[in-house]
Amino acid sequence: MQSYLLWSLYFNFINRTFKHLIMTQRELLVSTVQFYTSENRGTVPNSKACMYSKSDTSPGCAIGRFLPENVQKIFDKPDNGNYILGVEEIFENPDFVEMLPDWMLEIGEDFLSRIQSLHDSEFKWDSFGINNVGKTAVNLICSDFNLEPLTEEEFKHEECN
């Protein structure tokens, strides 16, 4: 019981620390587009999956880079399993949902799934950032969620800005 209480206090502290990273759907989309290239997406070798946690080549996946390290590790290997949780699996488990920052809950499962899918799709990225196939996918996300389309400037990788 005592270890659970300590973990709970620690988690609440970390969660409050990350609360300042409040983002809207569009801000998360722009941030994802501008941040990633084919070189830093953090995919697991010989797999299409990515890790929530940091690696030598990435600060984590589109969702994971905004999560505390302890939560990243839980989502990477829940119950010491051999798989990485998908966004849908996170939202199916109330304990996992509780670990998400409030702003991610407000953004919603459907949008987070689409962002993660965009990030996971290697054919939408090249060494300069998002490619034309990826831009089409982004425009579809904007349309589906009634967001203003991204400008050409917003599509540029942050190292190009």
Image: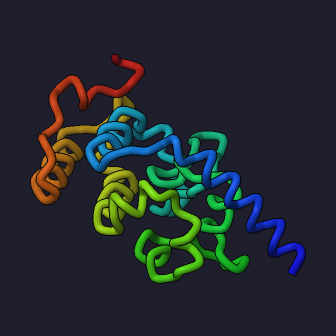
Q: What residue do we see at 87% from left, 73% from top?
A: 3
Outermost residue on the right side: it is 2
In the rendered view, how is the structure colored?
rainbow
Query: Residue 129, how many percent across, how many down?
Result: 34, 33
- Does residue 14 sit above or below 56 in this rendering? below
Q: What residue do we see at 41% from left, 34% from top?
A: 35
Identify the image quadrant of the C terminus: top left
Of residue 92 and residue 62, the one placed in the foreground of this image is: 92
Q: What residue do we see at 52% from left, 41% from top?
A: 20
Query: Residue 134, how many percent across, how many down?
Result: 23, 46
Of residue 130 and residue 9, the one placed in the foreground of this image is: 9
- Does residue 30 sit above or below 82 in this rendering? above
Query: Residue 63, how many percent across, how many down?
Result: 47, 54
Q: How many marks on residues?
A: 0
Outermost residue on the top side: it is 161
Identify the image quadrant of the N terminus: bottom right
Q: What residue do we see at 32% from left, 46% from top?
A: 24
Query: Residue 130, how many percent across, how many down?
Result: 29, 38
- Does residue 98 sit above or below 73 in this rendering? below
